């Protein structure tokens, strides 16, 4: 079974099974702050193509469109339910749609924001841009937002060179 077919089948199954949980989360997002339930973020996909990636909205609607670590005081922008969603990564569940539609994979480098120019340029030079971005990846299990850009890039390159079905299963297991 190819990775693309596996991604499609697993994301379809996950969307069906998790739909009650996602409905509950949607209601909680709606009740806890004003604005849409989903936030559609412009992200960089395979071959640097920009796509819209959905997440449950965990931030206030007027939050600047930058990586969270670049905000002066990120806590002031998080909604009441957003704290829990971000801590548990439940805000990421709508990305199953991006996997189902072939814009993402379960495992790969996390999709960069459209304005993370340094990361995009360095991934392109290293050939990482040819991969589908992932819901999780090697950088996520090795430190997520607590590692430097150089470390992220190094882990993205390592994944590019060593990716395999078993390695993907390992990364998925370590994600949980």
Image: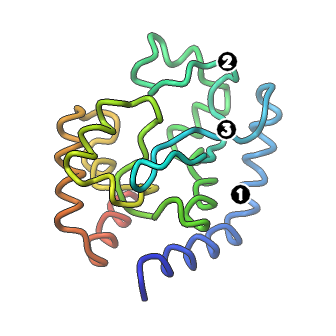
Q: Earlier in the sequence, mark 3 or mark 2?
A: 3
Q: Earlier in the sequence, mark 3 or mark 1?
A: 1
Q: Distance between the residues labelled 3 and 1?
A: 17 Å
Instruction: Give the vertical position of 49 relative to 2 (above or below).
Output: above
Name the side, left or right, on which 123 lies relative to 55.
left
Residue that protrudes farthest toward the top in the picture: 72
Per the image, the residue denoted by label 3 is 39
Q: Where's residue 71, x and y in %?
A: 46, 16
In the depicted view, which residue is nearer to us: 172 or 48?
48
Per the image, the residue denoted by label 1 is 21
Q: Distance between the residues labelled 1 and 2?
A: 26 Å
Dot 3 falls on a residue whose secondary structure is: strand
In the depicted view, which residue is nearer to us: 125 or 27?
125
Q: Indicate which disc residue 62 carries.
A: 2
Name the side, left or right, on which 116 lies relative to 42.
left
Residue 136, quarter of picture: bottom left
Give the class, few, some or many, for how many residues have Cα within 10 Å of label 3's Cα (few <14, many ≥20): some
Residue at horizontal 62 percent and vertical 69 percent from the top: 14
Name the side, left or right, on which 65 lies relative to 120.
right
Give the class, few, some or many, for how many residues have Cα within 10 Å of label 2's Cα (few <14, many ≥20): few
Q: Where's residue 33, x and y in %?
A: 77, 26
Q: Could you tell me which quadrant the N terminus lies in?
A: bottom left
Q: Where's residue 99, x and y in %?
A: 55, 64
Residue at horizontal 18 percent and vertical 36 percent from the top: 150
Give the class, few, some or many, for how many residues have Cα within 10 Å of label 1's Cα (few <14, many ≥20): few
In the depicted view, which residue is nearer to us: 117 or 148?
117
Q: Do the residues labelled 3 and 1 touch (CB within 8 Å)?
A: no
Residue at horizontal 38 percent and vertical 57 percent from the top: 175
């Amino acid at each position: 079974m190819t990775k693309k077919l596996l991604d499609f089948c697993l994301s379809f199954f996950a969307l069906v099974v998790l739909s009650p949980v996602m409905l509950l989360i949607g209601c909680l997002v709606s009740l806890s702050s004003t604005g849409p339930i989903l936030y559609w973020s412009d992200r960089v996909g395979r071959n640097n193509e920009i796509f819209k990636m959905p997440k449950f909205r965990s931030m206030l609607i007027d939050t600047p469109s930058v990586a969270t670590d670049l905000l002066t005081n990120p806590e002031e922008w998080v909604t009441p339910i957003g704290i829990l969603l971000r801590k548990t990564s439940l805000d990421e569940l709508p990305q199953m749609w991006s996997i189902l539609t072939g814009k993402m994979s379960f495992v790969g480098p996390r999709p960069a924001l459209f304005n993370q120019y340094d990361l995009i340029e360095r991934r392109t030079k290293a050939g990482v841009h040819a991969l589908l971005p992932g819901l999780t990846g090697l950088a996520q299990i090795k430190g997520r937002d607590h590692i430097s850009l150089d470390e992220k890039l190094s882990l993205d390159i390592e994944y590019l060179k060593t990716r395999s079905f078993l390695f993907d299963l390992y990364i998925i297991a370590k994600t949980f």
